[in-house]
């Protein structure tokens, strides 16, 4: 069973700074099958990044994804107030069919 | 506009059953894989199950905690996917989200509903 571990659990930053979020897989994951989601309180998750590095429709270019194999990164440049939320990575294809990381909470410092 | 809307949530006693519906619009439902994800109060996201399109085999796949208790089905004539939940446990209490799987080879979840709250309690 593949396990995704996100770090840090909580990240405290100020608007205008850069956020770097990590997602590590217990086994190699195809880059095509790695995605990132943003979730704000009381809202459904929203797809940010698919295929490890492609931005979903309508996602600002301050969001970028990178990585391969077992190590993936979500970078958010020039944090805006609306970016403070919980972020999840997700993989497809390895048992189980889908799995999510436990999430990283990005909070205002 | 691509949209999915869940319905059917509510309060149910342990051991009981409940069926959630997810009505889709704005895309060709016949070709879409659909996925259910849940989120227990204050917790992270947990995959529940996925149903492939008829053209993709129409098969359903489930997470271990729900295998044998939950069943996902689809009615392409109604653009609707269902989640039948039987033998419910208190740990099944969660918001259940329906989502559309991207139609490319990435399989990410590109459109989510607002969620349906299921509370399992005596």
Image (cartoon, coloured by chain):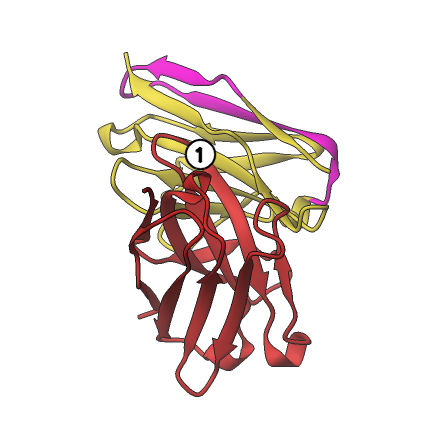
Q: Is residue A86 left or right of residue B31?
A: left
Identify the residue shown where x is 45% and y is 38%: B91
Location of the N terminus of chain B (image quadrant):
bottom left
Q: Main secondary structure of the magenta part?
A: strand
> Quadrant location of residue B81?
bottom left
Q: What chain is colored red?
A: B
Determine whether A11 is above or below A42 in the image.
Answer: above
The colour chain A appears in is yellow
Closer to the camera, A56 or B69?
B69
Q: Is residue A81 left or right of residue B107?
A: left
* Image location (x, y in percent) of residue A6: 55, 25
Q: Residues within 10 Å of mark 1 (few under 14, many from 20)?
A: some
Q: Is residue A67 left or right of residue A75?
A: right
* Image location (x, y in percent) of residue A16: 30, 21
> Quadrant location of residue A29?
top right
Q: Is any atom of residue B33 visible in this view?
A: yes
Determine whether B17 is above or below B21 in the image.
Answer: above
Q: What secondary structure is found at the residue carrying circle 1? A: loop
| Residue A60 located within the stretch drawn in magenta | no
Identify the residue shown where x is 39% and y is 38%: B40
Query: Which residue lies most toward the bottom here?
Result: B77
Q: Which residue is mark 1?
A: B44
Q: Is any atom of residue A52 visible in this view?
A: no
Determine whether A11 is above or below B88 in the image.
Answer: above
* Image location (x, y in percent) of residue B98: 41, 59
Q: Chain of mark 1?
A: B
Q: Is residue B113 left or right of residue B91?
A: left
Closer to the camera, A88 or A61?
A88
Determine whether B94 is above or below B35 in the image.
Answer: above
Extent of the magenta region? A7-30
């Amino acid at each position: 069973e593949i396990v995704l571990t996100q770090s840090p659990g909580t990240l405290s930053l100020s608007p205008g700074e850069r956020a770097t979020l990590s997602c590590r897989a217990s086994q190699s994951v195809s880059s095509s099958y790695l995605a990132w989601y943003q979730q704000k309180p009381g809202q459904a998750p929203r797809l940010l990044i698919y295929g490890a590095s492609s931005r979903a429709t309508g996602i600002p270019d301050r969001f970028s994804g990178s990585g391969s194999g077992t190590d993936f990164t979500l970078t958010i440049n020039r944090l805006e107030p609306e970016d403070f939320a919980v972020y999840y990575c997700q993989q497809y294809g390895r048992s189980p069919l889908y799995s999510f990381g436990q999430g990283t909470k990005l909070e205002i410092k | 506009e691509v949209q999915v809307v869940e319905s059917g949530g509510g309060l149910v006693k342990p051991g009981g059953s409940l069926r959630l519906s997810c009505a889709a619009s704005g895309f060709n439902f016949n070709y879409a894989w659909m996925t259910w994800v849940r989120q227990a109060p204050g917790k992270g996201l947990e995959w529940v199950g996925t149903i492939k399109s008829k053209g993709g085999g129409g098969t359903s796949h489930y997470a271990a905690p729900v295998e044998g208790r939950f069943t996902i089905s689809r009615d392409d004539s109604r653009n609707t996917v269902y989640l039948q939940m039987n033998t419910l446990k208190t740990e099944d209490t969660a918001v259940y989200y329906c989502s559309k799987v991207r139609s490319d080879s990435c399989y990410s979840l590109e459109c989510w509903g607002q969620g349906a709250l299921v509370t399992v309690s005596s």
